[in-house]
Image: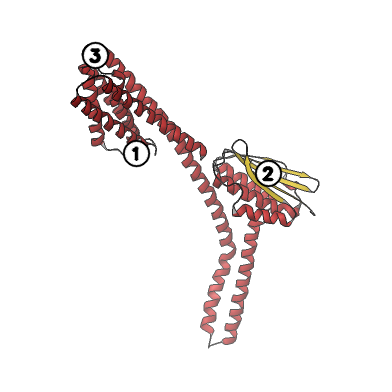
Amino acid sequence: MTDLRRLRGYTWWTVVAGGVAVAFGSVLDLVVHPYGVVKELLLGAAVVFVAVQHLRYMRHAMAGLGRGEHRPLEHAATFAVALVAWGVMAAEGGFIPAWCALPALVLAHVAAAVPGRSRWPVVLVGGAFTVATGFVFGGDEARPAVVMSLVVVATLVLADLAQLWMWDIALQQERARETTRALAVAEERLRFAADLHDIQGHHLQAIALKGELAERLIGRDDELARRHAAEVAELARTALRETREVVQGYRRASLGTEITNAVGVLRAAGIETAVAGDAADVPPPLQPLFGALVREGTTNVLRHSRARRCDVAISVVGDAVSVRLANDGVRSGGDTGAGAGLAGLRERFAAVGGRVEAGQAEPDGFELVGRAGVGR
């Protein structure tokens, strides 16, 4: 998330800088050269109007290319104001680079707002009007006005669109990553739901049927009704026991199983995952404990980071075991080890004389390490 915010800030300030530079150059030209009070006021108002519109629509474009507000009449009116100001100052011999950039600003934010199929036709038609205005009103400076307007329009529009295109790609990647994470979580939930349904479905159906039968037999054959009621109670106890077994099966899966599941989920989320060491070397009494560590670490990677890589390292030296999960792309201000899940892990490790360490890893990573030993 930190990288995305940084790119957003860079993109925004880049497109803002273009608009500010054009507005500053135009206003400076009005201040330095006397064009008449009325004309200067009108032209200054035109510059402010175009600059504000540019910043407004560029802010909308930060939602993605072609996803901003598209208002044809408003865009046409803004472009007309910019074009008139450019034509007037081309005839007056104003500072050409600044004034021909006014229509270019409008073309940049309109191109960012319209759908992709309309983007380049809008740029080409608007660019043609800008160049034609310089040619018609440029007078003795017609040729420089035409060349300069062509260069400025092409440079400014392409620069802004290139920045927004890179930002749009980053947004699409982030949306794809979030979708993949959600699908991975949904897949795990569906797997659990399917296992629970397969095990419990017939018990619940039998409980319902026998309960209805016992209800009908009350007052007609009380002994048989009591027998069916006893069977309902036994079925309920069996269902409860098997439900606990299902949950414990998920909670007490071996370390190897948890690592396999973690690798599958992380890779499905687009996170490259590598495992060093053999989970089979971890003593059986510690398998559920370190399996819980891997499960919690995987959850933290998916929820609290924009990781591109995650490394799992298993080390067994004598009776001492350590498992380390390290990932990059940690979010600024994210989880630093104070979450409820990590607190529970620390309690479980402390109960067997072990410990859990979690925190930042340079330069932008996060690591979770669990250490424990048999008989400690």
Residue 313, above or below 164: below
Residue 215, above or below 58: below
* Residue 313 image position (x, y, % from top left): 69, 42
* Residue 312 image position (x, y, % from top left): 66, 42
Residue position for label 3: 142
Q: In the image, 63: left or right of 88?
A: right
* Residue 368 image position (x, y, % from top left): 65, 45
Residue 266 in view of the camera: yes
Q: Is mark 3 on a helix, strand or loop?
A: helix
Q: Which mark is residue 68?
A: 1
The residues bearing labels 1 and 2 have C-alpha atoms spaced at a distance of 45 Å
Residue most toward the bottom?
A: 219
Residue type at mark 3 is: Ala
Along the line of sight, which residue is nearer the eye, 164 or 40? Answer: 40
Residue 38, above or below 272: above
Q: Do the residues labelled 2 and 3 touch (CB within 8 Å)?
A: no
Q: In the image, 146: left or right of 289?
A: left
Residue type at mark 1 is: Gly
Residue 205, above or below 108: below
Q: Do the residues labelled 3 and 1 touch (CB within 8 Å)?
A: no
Q: Residue at x 72, y 57 (%)?
A: 351
Q: Which residue is drawn at 27% across and 26% down?
A: 126
- Whichever of callouts 2 and 3 sits on the residue coming sooner in the sequence is 3
Q: What element carries label 2?
A: strand
- Whichever of callouts 3 and 1 sits on the residue coming sooner in the sequence is 1
Residue type at mark 2 is: Arg
The residues bearing labels 2 and 3 have C-alpha atoms spaced at a distance of 70 Å
The residues bearing labels 3 and 1 have C-alpha atoms spaced at a distance of 36 Å
Looking at the rendered image, the disc whose residue lies closer to the viewer, 2 or 3, is 3
* Residue 371 image position (x, y, % from top left): 72, 48
Residue position for label 2: 324
Residue 115 in view of the camera: no
